[in-house]
Image: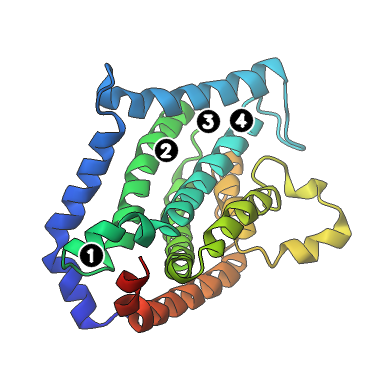
């Protein structure tokens, strides 16, 4: 699926990739008094708000789970991981357009751009998720050994996101409506995925349709790990894996076919 020449190009330009990720992270907090401290303060505030509002003020509870923090953990497990997916896909669909001048002036493997997008998103995600894990440890809600199952689920989610981002990013160069359409579609996609509500409240006639949404089993896997302390239902992840591989193959084929024409369109 990925040629040796492509991998060699990525390895040769690893310094360019690492430098771009570092520059982008630093540029987010440049000219602020607290600098990179905001990378910790912002997600910490979000986790505290979710915890205090939903567990202590609204007393939200999940059916069948007694812990007062269950809904807050359910919400954080869904929202934080959805945020990673949304960041990769939303930034990926404009990565070639936003770097048009760079593509015109410098010669480098264009496949570096999606890698930079994913690396940046993972850095942001690592900070916020480390705080979430710390919150679970402090409150005694850490799920234990099943947390290691998050790694393959995360890899699957990133694969799905990068495949979709690559397809959208290339199509958006030639058809600018694609980006606008996706910005609308991802809002519906969020609410059609049980991120903030339990899957059990979905009416029975709608559930078979929800099964076509590849993000449903992914988000449910995180929530099952962190809320219930159980291993994911691996068989449910077969569909998202199939969609992810399909999108990656389609994205790479489009990239090979159209990458030389993209600069003319930018």
Q: Earlier in the sequence, mark 4 or mark 1?
A: 4
Q: Earlier in the sequence, mark 4 or mark 2?
A: 4
Whole-number angstrom distance, CA of label 3 to CA of label 1: 51 Å
Q: Looking at the picture, tell me which residue is in the foreground, 32 or 142.
A: 32
Q: Looking at the picture, tell me which residue is in the foreground, 224 or 239.
A: 239
Whole-number angstrom distance, CA of label 3 to CA of label 4: 11 Å
Secondary structure at badge 4 equals helix
Whole-number angstrom distance, CA of label 1 to CA of label 2: 37 Å
Label placed on residue 23: none
Label placed on residue 129: 2
Q: Earlier in the sequence, mark 1 or mark 2?
A: 1
Q: Tag 3: Cα neighbours inside 10 Å, few (<14), some, or many (≥20)?
A: some
Vertical position of residue 104 compared to residue 248: above or below? above
Where residue 71 appears, as percent x and y from the top left, is: 66, 32
Q: Earlier in the sequence, mark 3 or mark 1?
A: 1
Where residue 179 appears, as percent x and y from the top left, is: 52, 59
Circles 3, 4 touching at the beta carbon (< 8 Å): no
Location of mark 4 (residue): 72
Foreground mark, 3 or 1, reads 1
Location of mark 1 (residue): 104
Vertical position of residue 148 compared to residue 253: above or below? above
Location of mark 3 (residue): 141
Taking the image as drawn, is residue 139 in sight? no
Vertical position of residue 180 compared to residue 29: above or below? below
Q: Residue at x 45, y 59 (%)?
A: 93
Q: Residue at x 50, y 44 (%)?
A: 83
* Quarter of the C terminus within the rendering: bottom left
Foreground mark, 4 or 1, reads 1
Classify residue 137 by image quadrant: top left
Whole-number angstrom distance, CA of label 3 to CA of label 2: 15 Å
Circles 1, 2 touching at the beta carbon (< 8 Å): no
């Amino acid at each position: 699926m990925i040629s040796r020449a492509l991998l060699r190009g990525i390895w040769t330009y690893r310094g360019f990739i690492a430098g771009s990720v570092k520059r982008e992270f630093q540029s987010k907090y440049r000219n602020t008094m607290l600098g990179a401290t905001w990378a910790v303060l912002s997600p910490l505030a979000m986790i505290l708000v979710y915890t205090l509002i939903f567990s202590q003020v609204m007393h939200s509870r999940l059916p069948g789970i007694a812990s007062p923090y269950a809904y807050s953990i359910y919400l954080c497990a869904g929202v934080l991981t959805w945020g990673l997916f949304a960041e990769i896909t939303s930034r990926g669909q404009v990565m070639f357009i936003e770097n048009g001048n760079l593509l015109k002036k410098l010669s480098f493997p264009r496949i570096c751009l999606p890698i930079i997008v994913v690396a940046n998103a993972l850095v942001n995600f690592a900070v916020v998720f480390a705080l979430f894990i710390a919150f679970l440890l402090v409150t005694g809600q850490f799920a234990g050994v099943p947390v290691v199952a998050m790694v393959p689920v995360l890899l699957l989610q990133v694969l799905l996101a990068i495949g979709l981002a690559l397809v959208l990013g290339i199509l958006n160069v030639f058809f600018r409506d694609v980006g606008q359409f996706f910005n609308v579609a991802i809002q519906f996609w969020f609410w059609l995925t049980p991120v903030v509500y339990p899957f059990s409240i979905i009416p029975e006639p709608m559930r078979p349709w929800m099964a076509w949404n590849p993000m449903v089993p992914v988000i449910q896997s995180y929530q099952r790990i962190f809320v219930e302390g159980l291993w994911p239902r691996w068989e449910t992840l077969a569909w998202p894996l199939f969609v992810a591989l399909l999108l990656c193959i389609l994205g790479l084929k489009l990239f090979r076919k159209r990458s030389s024409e993209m600069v003319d369109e930018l």
